[in-house]
Image: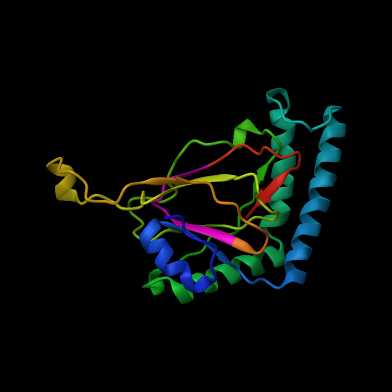
């Protein structure tokens, strides 16, 4: 079953059952508009100045432009990571997860937001399938909040991949009793965020639009 787009009250059930979820983060629209305006401004300035320095246009992506494109991404990422409105977005999401996820009092740390920036057809940002967590961190949740609508299916998430087979089952090569895994490519809109456990398999997909896409 594909987790439906829901309000935040459904996050706990969907995370537990499927390993991932989509919910509304409810950041005030004026704050979200501010983030988007600054993101667009910084992308324009960074692309223009780096492009002039290299005497090339940074669109469209190809491997010969990887270095200047990564420089432009790094500039935009540094501005977004320390922006007060982006921090409010992170705080809003963190607060809602703390209210809804069972035993969330055990969550001790929250990282600074990090910008995922995809140039159109940017193969450097595609895949591979992976997990975000570490075996020595028992509770780990990634959140992913786009700064643009995502009808192009920017993510692939594998439902039921978050179950960890028990030590004895692995030791004796016993069959897993986990439910079957299913692949989903969610389409998010502004105002929503995805979340998944550190043990949930997922990957970023190719940006098939004509625009630079960004998620925090």
Q: Determine whether, in the image, residue 120 is placed left or right of residue 94.
A: right
Q: Residue 62 or 74: which is nearer the viewer? A: 62
Q: Is residue 57 above or below residue 108?
A: above
Q: Which residues are magenta?
A: 193-203
Does the segment drawn in magenta span residue 35? no
Q: Residue 65 or 5: which is nearer the viewer? A: 5
Percent x, y of residue 44: 84, 45
Does the segment drawn in magenta span residue 201? yes
For the point 86% across and 27% down, the residue is 55
Which of the image's four quarters has the N terminus?
Answer: bottom left
For the point 67% across and 37% down, the residue is 208
Percent x, y of residue 50: 81, 36
Percent x, y of residue 146: 65, 55
Q: Residue 20 or 2: which is nearer the viewer? A: 2
For the point 38% across and 50% down, the residue is 134
Which of the image's four quarters has the C terminus?
Answer: bottom right
Toward which corner of the image does residue 112 lie, by quadrant?
bottom right
Colour convention of the picture: rainbow
What secondary structure prevails in the magenta region?
strand
For the point 42% across and 68% down, the residue is 12
Percent x, y of residue 13: 40, 67
């Amino acid at each position: 079953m594909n987790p439906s787009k829901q309000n935040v009250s459904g996050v706990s059930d969907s995370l537990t059952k499927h390993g991932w979820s989509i919910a509304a983060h409810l950041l005030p629209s004026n704050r979200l508009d501010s983030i988007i305006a600054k993101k667009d401004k910084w992308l324009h300035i960074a692309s223009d100045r780096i492009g002039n320095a290299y005497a090339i246009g940074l669109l469209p992506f190809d491997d010969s432009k990887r270095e200047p494109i990564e420089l432009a991404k790094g500039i935009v990422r540094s501005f977004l990571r320390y922006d007060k409105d982006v921090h409010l977005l992170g705080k809003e999401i963190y607060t809602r997860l703390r209210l809804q996820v069972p035993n969330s009092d055990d969550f001790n740390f929250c990282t600074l937001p990090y910008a995922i920036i995809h140039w159109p057809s940017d193969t450097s940002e595609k895949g591979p399938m992976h997990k975000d967590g570490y075996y020595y961190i028992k509770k780990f949740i990634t959140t992913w909040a786009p700064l643009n609508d995502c009808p192009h299916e920017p993510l692939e998430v594998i439902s039921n991949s978050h179950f960890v087979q028990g030590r004895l089952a692995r030791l004796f090569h016993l069959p897993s009793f986990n439910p079957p895994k299913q692949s989903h490519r969610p389409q998010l809109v502004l105002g929503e965020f995805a979340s998944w456990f550190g043990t949930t398999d997922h990957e970023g997909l190719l940006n098939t639009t004509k625009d630079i896409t960004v998620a925090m």
